[in-house]
Image (spheres, rainbow, N blue to C red):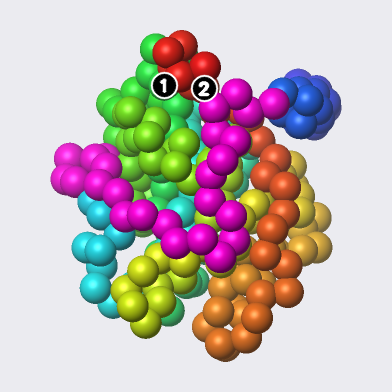
Amino acid sequence: MQRQFPLLLLLLSVFALLTSAMVAQNGYQVGDVATDFTLKNVNGQMMSLKDQKNAKGYVVTFTCNTCPFAKLYEDRLIQLHQKYAPLGYPVVAINPNDVTASPGDSFEQMQKRAKDKKFPFAYLQDESQEVTKRFGATRTPHLYILQKTSQGQWKVAYIGALDNNAGDPEKVTERYAENALNSLLANQPIAQTFTKAIGCTIKWRASAQ
């Protein structure tokens, strides 16, 4: 079974690359200003970007309970949050999947997953999928780094993958998100502002397709 798992990931990756995004085609680009949102966290409370007054930005990550790629990145997201939240860039995870199309991504299952994995970051449900479409996310995981401007706006600084090896964290050679965050913290330009997100396609509700 362990030998078949890398093959399964490869097949899922090929499928994801060949499958076009039917809904989220006109989302944010690097340099755009992201609109704040209000979504329900697994703790039952509503959350907006403006809530954390000391945040310099956010690592907004569209992820879910059910995608093998998303599961492989959970521990890395936890580590990213633990490293950069104290520096002003917390992770905010958003589950974009339609519950009818993916029952394993229900709010109750999100609460269970967050508890089992001891997520230190917010895990929000985009029930209407409007925030997902606004961002232009197409995969789980799909990562957006936002930087707070002097005007209090949220500028998109990076879009794409967390790193360059979904299957094996020990074989990662490029840490895209960390590189971008380190550049922001050093007030330097980000060398690579966009990479291709690799993961499962988002499960859109039938009316959105």
Q: Residue drawn 32% across and 29% down?
A: 127
Number of numbered tags placed on the structure image: 2
Three-letter amino acid code at disc 2? Lys
Q: Which residues are magenta?
A: 20-46
Q: Which mark is residue 174?
A: none
Q: Quadrant of the N terminus?
A: top right
Quadrant assignment, res 92: bottom left
x and y, in percent, of residue 118 in the image? 37, 48
Residue placed under numbered mark 1 in the picture: 98
x and y, in percent, of residue 72 in the image? 62, 41
Res 27 seen here: yes
Which secondary structure dominates the residues rendered in magenta? loop
x and y, in percent, of residue 3 in the image? 83, 27
Three-letter amino acid code at disc 1? Asp
Tell which circle, 1 or 2, labels the residue nearer the N-terminal end.
1
Residue 194 lies left or right of residue 75; in this view the side is right
Return the residue nearer the eye: 60 or 154.
Answer: 154
Q: Please determine whether, in this image, residue 81 is positioned above or below residue 7.
A: below
Q: Residue drawn 41% across and 21% down?
A: 98
Q: Is 35 part of what is drawn in magenta?
A: yes
- How far is the residue under mark 1 from the one under mark 2? 6 Å
Residue placed under numbered mark 2 in the picture: 203
Res 12 seen here: no
